[in-house]
Amino acid sequence: MSETVKHSLMFAFVGVLIILDGTTSFGIFAGSWNSALGILNMGLVSAIMALGVNLQWGFAGLFNVGIMGFTALGGLAVVLVSSSPTPGAWSQGGIGIIMALILGALTVVAAVFITKNMTKGKPRVLALTALLIAGFFAYRAVFDPAVSGVEAINPALYGSLGGLGLPVLLAWPAGGLLAAGAAWLIGKTALGLRSDYLAIATLGIAEIIIAIMKNEDWLSRGVKNVVGLPRPMRKEIVLQEDPGFLDTAASLGLDPVVASTLYVKITYSLLFTVVLLALLWMAQMGLKSPWGRMMRAIRDNEVAAEAMGKNVTRRHLQIFVLGSAICGVAGAMMTTLDGQLTPGTYNPLRFTFLIWVMVVVGGSGNNFGAVLGGIFIWFFWIKVEPMGAGLINFVTYGLAEDSALKLHLLDSTAHMRLFTMGLILLLVLRFSPRGLIPEK
Amino acid sequence: GGHAKEVKLGILFGFTGPIESLAPSMGAGAELAMAEVTKSGMLLDTATVTPMRADTGCIDNGLSTANAEKMLADGVSGIIGGDCSGVTGAILQNVAIPNGMVMISPSATSPGLSTMEDNGLFFRTAPSDAREGQVMAEVLTDRGVKSIALTYTNNDYGKGLADAIKTSFEAVGGEVTISAAHEDGKGDYSAEVGALASAGGDILVVAGYLDQGGLGIIQSSLDSGAFDKFGLPGGMIGDSLPANVGADLNGSFGQIAGSGGQGAEAYFAMAEEAGFDGSSPYSPESYDAAALVMLAMQAANSKDPADYGAKIMDVANAPGEKIYPGELGKALELLKAGTDIDYVGASAVELIGPGESAGSYREIEVTDGANKTVQFR
Amino acid sequence: MIVVEDVHKHFGGFHAVDGATLEIAKGSITGLIGPNGAGKTTLFNVIAGVLPPTSGRVKMDGEDITGLPPHTLFHKGLLRTFQIAHEFSSMTCRENLMMVPGGQSGETLWNTWFGRKRIADEERALRAKADEVMEFLTIEHISDLKAGQISGGQKKLLELGRTMMVDAKIVFLDEVGAGVNRTLLYTIADAIKRLNEERGYTFVVIEHDMEFIGRLCDPVICMAEGKVLAQGTLDEIKANEQVIEAYLGTGLKNKDKLEAGA
Amino acid sequence: MDLLNALVALTNYVMIPAVAYGSQLALGALGVTMIYAVLRFSNFAHGDTMAFGTMVTILVTWWMQSMGINLGPLPTALLALPFGILGCMALLLFTDRVVYRFYREQKAKPVIFVMVSLGVMFMMNGLVRFIIGPGDQRFSDGERFIVSARDFKAMTGLREGLAFKTSQGITIITAVVVVAALFWFLNRTRTGKSMRAYSDNEDLALLSGINPERVVMYTWMIVAGLATIAGVLYGLDKSFKPFTYFQLLLPIFAAAIVGGLGNPIGAIAGGFVIAFSEVSITYAWKKILRYLMPENLEPDGLVQLLSTDYKFAVSFVILLIVLLFKPTGLFKGKSV
Amino acid sequence: MSGNPYQNDRGNKDASITSTSGRSTIEPGLKHSGEVKPVIGDSPFLVGDTMTGGYGKGPDILHECTIAVNPGEIAVIVGPNGAGKSTAMKAVFGMLNVRSGKVLLDGEDITNLSPQDRVVKGMGFVPQTSNIFTSLTVEENLEMGAFIRTDDIRNTMEQIYHLFPILKDKRNQAAGELSGGQRQQVAVGRALMTQPKVLMLDEPTAGVSPIVMDELFDRIIEVARTGIPILMVEQNARQALEIADKGYVLVQGRNAYTGTGKELLADPEVRKSFLGG
Ligand SMILES: Nc1ncnc2c1ncn2[C@@H]1O[C@H](COP(=O)(O)OP(=O)(O)OP(=O)(O)O)[C@@H](O)[C@H]1O
Ligand SMILES: Nc1ncnc2c1ncn2[C@@H]1O[C@H](COP(=O)(O)OP(=O)(O)OP(=O)(O)O)[C@@H](O)[C@H]1O
Ligand SMILES: CC(C)C[C@H](N)C(=O)O
Ligand SMILES: [Mg+2]
Ligand SMILES: [Mg+2]
């Protein structure tokens, strides 16, 4: 069996799983198209994240454990771009906040300037310290009142700057840009050091990004969440009242509720698929070109690539920024799908380490593998719990209904998920270290 | 008509994730109500009620909507959940509203959810945090407190509540020296307590959870001598707090949603018999949430959400005969007979405006190592 | 062309290069010899920007290039090979060569999506050039093998080939001959000579094989213990007392001791 | 000016908590650094290893309490600790046998080990919750205080109280003892030296007849001990919760790297640097300044550099600053 | 890059999660020791007999290469860079897959033994590079050399300090702080601490100044005089061959010339190709 056929069959297998979930309710399957499409949609988003991580790990060996942070920044972009502006926020302090941020940035720029242009020694240390202290206090002096101004505007409903009120689809590329900007800053510091400290830097900065999003209410209401974000299509309840839609549904023999929910989900599926295919195409094109050759050369032997005129640090930075941007886009898509931004929900196990499982299981270094891994592992993430319950019921078949052990085990089925993900990762790393679809 | 013999109800809580320690008691509370109803054999001509649990992860929107979809596919007639306000919003917008499913949350307290367009499908047995802020301010002024330090658990509940307390208290002329967040489940709160102590204040108000960060903060404050008196909002009221902290807590005070101890006491006893901790946060509210759904079904004589959704407010509020935990069978009988009921339940349910708990509160003071109700507000 | 002024490179307390000063004339093929650990490779690494010097400077055509990163130096026309072959092991030999030229339009991501025609044309030219280089080095039969699979000598040739893909000004060769068979070595020597004569490349060659050095190099610089010990034509070097002592050797005084003991 | 009260306040709110927390971090970081030095990778499962060891200790503690065994004023958990360590050793040796050893034989690259440890992390995470559940567990008993704030005030008549908890005392003493024992072991015993030798140069260790598998085994055993002790101390001082232990991974890594990965002294220093900076940068200095400054100069604000929300962000900022100026950490780590 | 997927780190160099210093470079799959067979017939004390092999799945580096040494002898391997001299040493020591041929020591066939077990059998080896524990003190380095011994090692240590007096002065200094020559002395000393039956040295004088080199050769001769056979690789071929009882010239993994040191030094062909005339 040729490789291509084999790999196509794997994709087909995942497709069949999803179709089964839509059609039968046997065993772990839900037997509902809403459930199946829901899984598919998040699967597509996961696939995009895996694609971004695969770009970094598979093609440049960069170990990013801050995926969560970039995903969250994508989500933030959705709020900033598409939610409606808070009345009066800009006059109450929005401008002040922007000015404070500019002031802060200027301080940093000045500090860098001093470091570069003064010779080492006491005067430089003094100048730097004075500048930083002065800058910090000036920044706080402008920033704090502006923030209180914004946060005082009806905190139960607003209390933030709000967004620009633009179409939500625009937020997706914006999410990519925001994540790219953060990645650039991180990469510049962590990859520019004498040896590479990317892992710990991303691990930490992802947490810091989440902390900022949780605590800076003026930005996106912090832990108070932003709900009811706009969607790229009409809402189900609107559709359910649209005579035209009802007619179409009726002519297809569909219940209006089912038809409207499916309509929304299918639209999302199509949009996500388009984004996924576009990114996949771009990644593949890059990979098969001299650019990809250069990246492989760098991966094979950094020293030699450097000697052959390739700027390794810059290329690493480029690919790190690109991969992170893709995670940002995926994050924005996910927030759009959820219809809300909830900074408290970002957790490294789910948003960083699970993506790693997807990439490794799918096949590091192969874009198609990453996509397959993304959808496949997501399916498992959802279905492990029912599988676990089934398994425990089977194993404890002989035990009485109310035996303490059985009850304890059944209570714990939810924890099966983490356990199983670990198991899958270990099994793949051991027996198929190249993943389901290995790099060619 | 057309009553099936089985009613499935979904229980959608965060059995994993940050509140994984609360979820079991909440789930057990909801299941307790269902078991009670099934046992009574009164619901819709002896229908049995089957609970279906699924996980939200508390923070995992993707997982929770997927699980909600699965529940719908399995044919549930109502959802008890979600728990954390974040995922609750996600399930509501993406699953419940589009599918016309009734959802009743025992614990999502974010004021933001009040204004969500829910097509009359979303209810909650916990009051919005905005209300509690006012009550707390009253309690504080009545007790002559001039200044407070304020700390809150860093989620929408804590933050929203802290905002509400701060606004209300400052409106009546009180001073809030500091309002600082604490993360639940961190274990170490010395830095937070250091900052709070430094800011000072007559008492420390802890808008957190009694077996989470809130306890840690109180313990740490007492240990280091930073504060010796505490203001305790609803999330901090429960037997386990005085039990865990000991005599040092005497004199601290607070308030919790509820119009009287009778319902709660009855519930705690039932819970103890069933082998779980009924005083765990949101466990009473979970029992009530499940009870309300089933009572509304009986009132509408249908398990179709489109029918019974509208009845929830009716059974929850006066007029009618007051119903306490353990009396669900009686309530069903009354409803069948066409008599009005006013469900009080374990958490003194009273639903207002957008389908959320009105929030009458009882003021509590810790005396001799136990929570004593001082008065009602 | 290249001027090295009092370069020091210390690893911890160890002085690998300890005040080397030398000059490399344009158009020359300079031989660099010296005992193992004399600091030759380290000096190469300092000049090529792989290691920052502890002190001292390096100039190229009058311009201070101390501490510039290798990729910048590459674009200034300074190339080097490695003592231990640094091939791109998972790429074919042809790809190893084709990746070398800088400024390929296909190295810009944008072009890989929207400038595919131009890339295709460039690639064709590159491929032709790579094939030509491989033919020159008599390794055309391995062009499609992964570079990780070829022999050590072939890797050395491949490294040399990489320097031929662009118009270099100066090329540093670190023991090209090691592990290369004699006949081939002389082919390489010829190639170096031709590049030097036809294209005007300047070469600096580290080599332990005196015959190879003799065929190619003038002048020869001998290093020892991180310093330049002597400089001159090979014959002068061979006659230099210090060089004989440090590198070429005269024999052992201990010999008698062994016999006495045995 | 009231120097005494200022000093007491400083000790009470900054010094004691930071020293106790620092000791716990240091013990955790020591475990990470040992694995890094000998097995050459950062173990992402370390937080969960701590949780596992602590869990075993807790289960044994409960059993002992139910049997009426106790240590009087000291927590029973100290008696149960050896069992926890044994349990943790068993788990780690088992994991090594069925998971890591294969990769060692394959001479897998360290980054592969890192990914393997991610898998182990997931599994241990699930395992601990499976057994003890996800909730908060308290298991400290015995006397709570060595000196309580109230007693201190009564004793000295100062306005500020000084509290010193038993758990803090135990933490500090245990940390000192454990660290001393570890250093004695590494520098004075044959096995300890062989571990350092292996860490320095694997091949040469082999040539000297040192059995790598034994070194690895001892390392896991020591790591099990360190992790369990750190976890139990943390749990006694605060409380036990699986998720908290997973999150401890971040400051522990930061501590190990700030100190210089692979260097035990660095791990300890790193632990204290992180703990002290976390506490002091987010501490509101208002109170202390009020004692020190003349009446009219008292600060209005809280005099807090960063709000406590960003407490743990501090560890990473410190980390980045250290790495920018000293890429190998405060004490020269293994990496170049 | 090897074909082994477990060894593919995709060029990752992240210092915050992985450390590469001091990692083993020995081939995977050489852990387990096989049986030791007695040898029938007469053979040199240590001999690597017609060894063929290479690294991993890579090409053969050694081609039917034979190297032997007897008590009291110094055998020297010379040859151009990359000829396989170090590889031959590693093969004799079991750090390499020998595909055909065998290794005999003291009348036993030890081809199937792991390096550790060869140490136990009495082989001492000083590698060409990274041959000391840089972070350990000099004395600890020596102690580690005696790791497999259970008897009192103080005597041996005194002997070593006697042989290399400089080490005694520096006994409490980290070995990484020593000069190149001193390091080599530590390395040889460490190997001698096992009280080996045979000592193998890979370029002991690499990177060592001529004076120290003489010194080292001196010491090596002294060691040889105690009856320990010495097998060494030397770049300073001329000098080495002068003290050698037996010389092997390797070219591309094959025995090109074999003879006594004197013979090789006299051979014009050898002089021309390898000794610089
Ligand atoms: N990164 C490093 N760290 C520490 N010491 C080093 C490093 N690189 C080289 N050295 C030391 O510097 C000295 C000079 O090494 P170098 O490679 O320059 O020698 P060389 O003259 O090229 O020798 P050869 O002829 O063997 O190639 C050696 O003793 C070597 O051990
Ligand atoms: N670990 C390794 N993996 C694969 N190939 C190797 C390895 N080590 C050495 N080689 C190859 O084996 C061949 C012989 O190397 P070896 O080190 O034995 O040479 P040598 O004769 O000792 O040279 P030198 O005098 O430079 O030390 C070389 O072509 C080298 O590239
Ligand atoms: C269970 C609790 C954490 C829920 C909280 N009241 C919220 O609204 O999110
Ligand atoms: Mg060299
Ligand atoms: Mg060698």
Image (cartoon, rainbow, N blue to C red):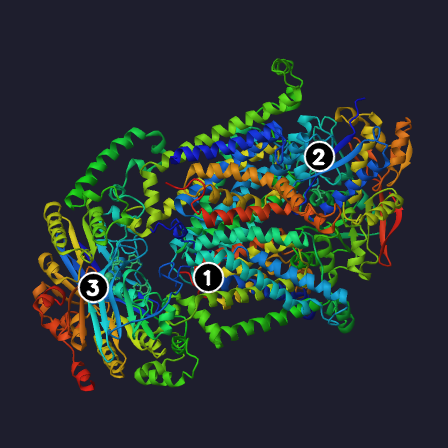
Q: Nearer the viewer, residue B259 or D203?
A: D203
Res C7 visible: no
Q: Which secondary structure, mark 2? A: helix
Residue A284 drawn above or below residue D186: above
Q: Quadrant of residue D73?
A: bottom right
Q: Nearer the viewer, residue E76 or A126?
A: E76
Q: Nearer the viewer, residue A375 or B8?
A: B8
Q: Quadrant of residue E68?
A: bottom left
- Residue D50 shown left or right of residue B204 in the figure: left
**Quarter of the image that includes the C terminus of chain D:** bottom left
* Label 3 CA crowd tier, 10 Å (few <14, some 14–19, many 20+): some
- Subunit that carries the residue with mark 1: D
**Quarter of the image that includes the N terminus of chain D:** bottom right
Tell which tag, 2 or 1, sits nearer the viewer: 1
- Subunit that carries the residue with mark 3: C
- What's the residue at 13%, 68% (across, down)? E275
Which label belongs to residue C21? 3
Check chain identity for marks 3 and 2: say if they share one: no
Tell which tag, 3 or 2, sits nearer the viewer: 2
Which label belongs to residue B247? none
Q: Position of residue D160 (x, y in %)?
A: 73, 66
Residue E234 drawn above or below residue A261: below
Check chain identity for marks 1 and 3: say if they share one: no
Q: Position of residue A56 (x, y in %)?
A: 43, 44
Q: Nearer the viewer, residue A327 or E40?
A: E40
Quarter, ligand 3: top right
Res E220 visible: yes
* Label 1 CA crowd tier, 10 Å (few <14, some 14–19, many 20+): many
